[in-house]
Image: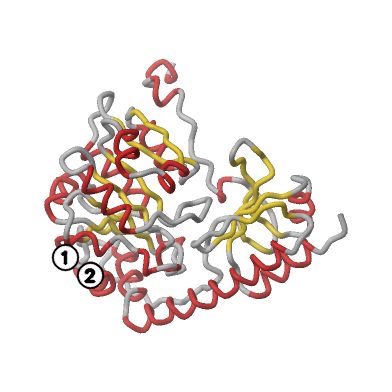
Amino acid sequence: MSESLLPNNIAELKAYSSAKSEKLTGTTWLNANESPYAKEFQLSLNNLNRYPEPQPENVINAYCSYAQLNAEQVLMTRGADEGIELLMRTYCESGVDSIAIFTPTYGMYKVSADTQNIAINELSQKLLLDAEVSEINEAVGKAKLVFVCNPNNPTGSLTPINKIAALAKSLEGKAIVVVDEAYIEFCPEHSAVSLLQDFNNIAVLRTLSKAFALAGLRTGFLLANSSLLAPVRKVIAPYPVSTAVALIAEQALSSDSVTQMRRQVSILNGNKERLKTLLNGSPKVTQVLSGEGNFVTLQLKDKNDIDAAMQQGTIMRPFSLYGDENWLRISIGNEQELEQVRLWLEQPE
């Protein structure tokens, strides 16, 4: 009976398959682009009988200091995923409007659009990276939101800031360019946040899940100028951020914690270079994509090698890419975790 009540777009929806949705067992977890670093936080919660601040002032101010923005340009969300949802709910009319994405890319853009009955103009990463802005503009068509994951998940490719600026300029009055910077701390010089001073049609998605090592907190930020964010503030839930989350996020954004995060990023970037050297020298690997996030994506000669890794307890993320099923994404872990990858690579074929 309940199935007959479902709208067609939900009945036909293919849900996002996250790394944690698969019930896997292992000892080395390199499948979800998480940080290997855990940190303890202090919580004093004697006021949970009261509703939290809708946008916790201390957290907003701390993120403003970190991102060099003002409070009107920052909206705290439940992970960057809520930012994606909010932009679609605010700016796209269900059954009428569309978004543009450049595949292969993060799967939640498609899931969010499908959920809200918003059409998807699926373009290619190759077009985004190689084509002239005029050609991209034409291909985007009437899309209201144009999603640029930068660095891109799962390929790790980077779209230059000047190209994002040129694309936003060409789409003024037509569309919002949404730059998803979930991994930007691993290459901060490529952030599009500096473009906000010149553009009202650029939105930037951020998260504390990756470099800040807080994937379990589900905290993100939507950054844009006040004219773009004002309607979104009408759409967001009245109390999106719990008191406990706000207290932890405030500590994570302190000056000392940001310094610690940058030190950890430096270590992880070094580990990434060592991993790429291992992969490029392995007979098991046919291709390594040059990525800028906290992961490396590669193509294996034999997909069955993934089973051998899982049997030894090393869990990585297999997926299909460019029509082939022998691709693997390895999150950058600590030295002990990368040692497990080395042992797997050196197993006889």
Category of crowding for the residue at label 2, using alpha-carbon neighbours closer than 10 angstroms: few (below 14), some (14–19), many (at least 20): some
x and y percentages locating residue 170 in the rendered image? 22, 44
x and y percentages locating residue 22 in the rendered image? 61, 46
x and y percentages locating residue 300 in the rendered image? 72, 50
Q: Is residue 248 above or below residue 206?
A: below
Instruction: Confirm or deny contact between disc 2 and disc 1 (CB under 8 A).
Output: yes
Please give left or right for residue 341 compared with residue 225 in the image. Answer: right
Category of crowding for the residue at label 1, using alpha-carbon neighbours closer than 10 angstroms: few (below 14), some (14–19), many (at least 20): some
Look at mark 2 in the image and give the residue it sits on.
64
Furthest residue to the right? Answer: 348
Front one among 12 and 127: 127
N-terminal of the two: label 2 or label 1?
2
Which numbered disc covers residue 302?
A: none
Please give left or right for residue 313 compared with residue 189 in the image. Answer: right
Q: Is residue 312 above or below residue 81?
A: below
SS category of the residue bearing label 1: helix
Residue at horizontal 53 percent and vertical 59 percent from the top: 291
Q: Amino acid at mark 1?
A: Ala
Look at mark 1 in the image and give the residue it sits on.
71
Q: Quadrant of the N terminus?
A: top left
SS category of the residue bearing label 2: helix
Residue at horizontal 21 percent and vertical 40 percent from the top: 90
Q: Amino acid at mark 2?
A: Cys
